[in-house]
Amino acid sequence: MSAPLPASAPASRAPGAALIFKNAAISALVALVLFSLMIGVRTEAGPDGQLTYWTRFGELATVVALVFGGSIIVELLRQWWGPASETKIIPPSVQNGLAVAGRWIGPVLLVFAILIPVIFYNERYLLDLSILVLTYVMLGWGLNVVVGLAGLLDLGYVAFYAVGAYSYALLATNFGLSFWICLPLAGILAAFCGVLLGFPVLRLRGDYLAIVTLAFGEIIRLVLINWQSLTGGPNGVTGIPRPTLFGIPLTPADDGLAALLRIEFSPTHRIVFLFYLILALALITNWVTIRLRRLPIGRAWEALREDEVACRALGINTTTTKLTAFATGAMFGGFAGAFFATRQGFISPESFTFHESALVLAIVVLGGMGSQLGVVLAAIAMIGGFELFRGLDQYRMLVFGLAMVLLMIWRPRGLIGHRAPTVFLEKNQAISSDLVKEGHG
Amino acid sequence: MDYFAQQLINGLVLGSIYGLIAIGYTMVYGIVGMINFAHGDIFMIGGFIALITFLILVSFGLTAIPLILLVVLLVSMAITALYGWTVERIAYRPLRHSFRLAPMLSAIGMSFVLTNFSQVSQGARVKPVPPIITGGHTLHEGADGFVVQLSNIQIIVVITTVVLLALFTWLVSRTRLGRDMRACEQDQTMAALLGVDVDRTISMTFVIGAALAAVAGMMYLLYYGLVDFFMGFVAGIKAFTAAVLGGIGSLPGAMLGGLLIGLIETLWSAYFSVEYKDVAAFSILIVVLIFLPTGLLGRPEVEKV
């Protein structure tokens, strides 16, 4: 990072055309070396197992030209954009605007969410997509308790999602328990796993914590793959029962909901039901989190995030604080997992890779760590964006990774980069999230 | 006993490869304080570049194996090092003074980019190569007919690792660059005040780490005879586990951790079950960290108020 130049010398900030051109040429040269073998040469195993290769200099030239043009455009955009401001306290005018927007965006989004099945009743694809987004919103809110509030970096959140999903799938297929009995059980089992993970990591901080949670997530996935007699191994669990409306199945059968209400059966009923189910679950997560933030335990979480040593000095029991954070976050993950299992009807370890953990963590961080509304916006942006690029097929993950890098560079503090503290002296004042600590783990 | 000796050899060879990757993690962590999640994928890119260079050289009619190996080694080190430099420049440098999670997520994003870049550009199928170095030595023939083998590839992997480690230790302890690196590790602001070019030093750290990962990638290619676009993830996690096990930030620790993880994995698959070898490696990590929260050779982190 170059040293900040004084604001009084704007002329020296803007590099001239020659310099931009030179930088672009250097970028293109670097790209040429980087891609010379990886793009310029394509290898493939022939029919007899012998590797062959052929050259693709056309593609190589295209990519290098793109890098050259791209770096010129980026530099021009950077000049046009101007330097970023570095204020820590949000100016009052912006604060008022944010307050008004904050007061309205939440309810408006909520009303819109409730109306989605009415508006898009015939758009099956959109309904499915909104269910997916809501699942990630719920996961994001669950992880937000651990990462955003307690400041404990968890890279294995998907483990709890998996525990919830498998709990429901196995209990329902082996013992015939209904969804409404399994849902709390899945939550309890996931919370239990959260405590199980919490104990060994109590003394760990920062990146040690990150790697242990990552290892925990991988262990759970590997056990799911290898414990064939219980989990069905890589083939997963099939035939997971669909949810019922408190015992009334959503089927065309005589005792189904459609027959009881004397309306014509449509498979969309089930989708709409699933939509409201996940919406309710997500809202419960949100409500519980908001309430917990105002309870002593929630205050203790945030204190832990800001300074663990001070926390201990003030007599907060960090052991129970950390364990409850892990357990609460894991419980919501478990609920979401049970919902995932009942929605899909089929689960396999494929669905619970590190990629999912990274995606949920990206949603939380991009949402602005600890901001409930931010998580919603980030989930819509990430999942919606991911769906937009469905047509790109194999380039989709490439674009996704690039987007993640660029978003982090653009807004390291997330989309909602301000915070309304729950405790304040005299006057509530929104602060930049630069002032919020991220916790030591 | 013979069986154990054979597993010990295999484990040490695998451990050398993990150790080479782990050095990259631990070096970057020591200086910048972040987990370079893309490092495993840098290792994978190194393997791919070694494979492509090898193919090109063979198709040009080169037959002298030592010459081929030397050229492949140098080319893959050079190009992979440039990958390391570019990743740092694009994804990490703008976030250097940002909060801790931002560079980490950017690194995870970069890891997705590299994985999928090589999938898109080189295809998803596994790339096998015929054994390049063949032959070996029989160390001991047991009464029951079990033969303890030491193959030439294993010798090459171990020798390369030892030579590189010696070179690397010399670099860190005796050269100007190494002194700059150690200075940046202790206090970046102070180092900058004393005339150390911090940006350049950090770039060089990534370059050296990537070059070592490229060597590991080439050794993997020689030893296992295949590369694929997804191999960076698992190898990366294991190497990071090794770095943490040895005490992150400690260079001898990284090598020690790598050897331990290699041994645990090999012995576990030999005596218990192949399926759970990764579970064993990760469980050992968790157990070690419960009792030694800073790894085997790591310095205890004292927080002053």
Image: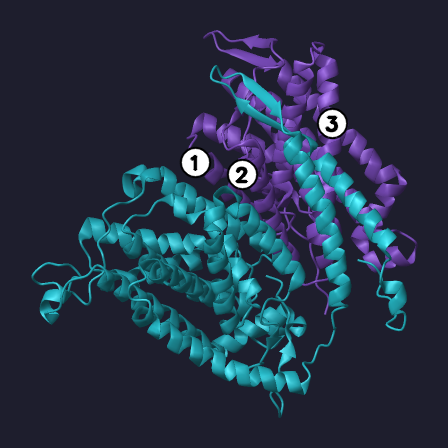
Taking the view exactly as shown, the residue that stands out farthest to the bottom is A426
Q: Nearer the viewer, residue A386 or B177?
A: A386
For residue A214, side relative to residue A291 (left or right): right
Where is residue A141 shown, x and y percent of the image? 46, 67
Give the distance between the C-alpha atoms of the residues marked 1 and 3, in whole angstroms.
36 Å
Where is residue A34 shown, x and y percent of the image? 71, 37
Q: Mark 2 points at which residue?
A: B234
Q: What kind of residue is marked 2?
A: Val
Q: Residue at x 62, y 82 (%)?
A: A430
Q: Disc 1 or disc 3, which is closer to the eye?
A: 3
Q: Which badge, 1 or 3, is on the more N-terminal residue?
A: 3
SS assignment at label 2: helix
For residue A282, side relative to residue A210 (left or right): left
Q: Nearer the viewer, residue A262 or A414?
A: A262
Q: What kind of residue is marked 1?
A: Tyr
The chain in purple: B
Residue B276, numbered label: 1
Give the distance between the C-alpha atoms of the residues marked 3 and 2, in whole angstroms.
25 Å
Mark 3 belongs to chain: B
Instruction: Tell me what hue chain A is rendered in.
Output: cyan
Circle 3/circle 2 CB separation < 8 Å: no
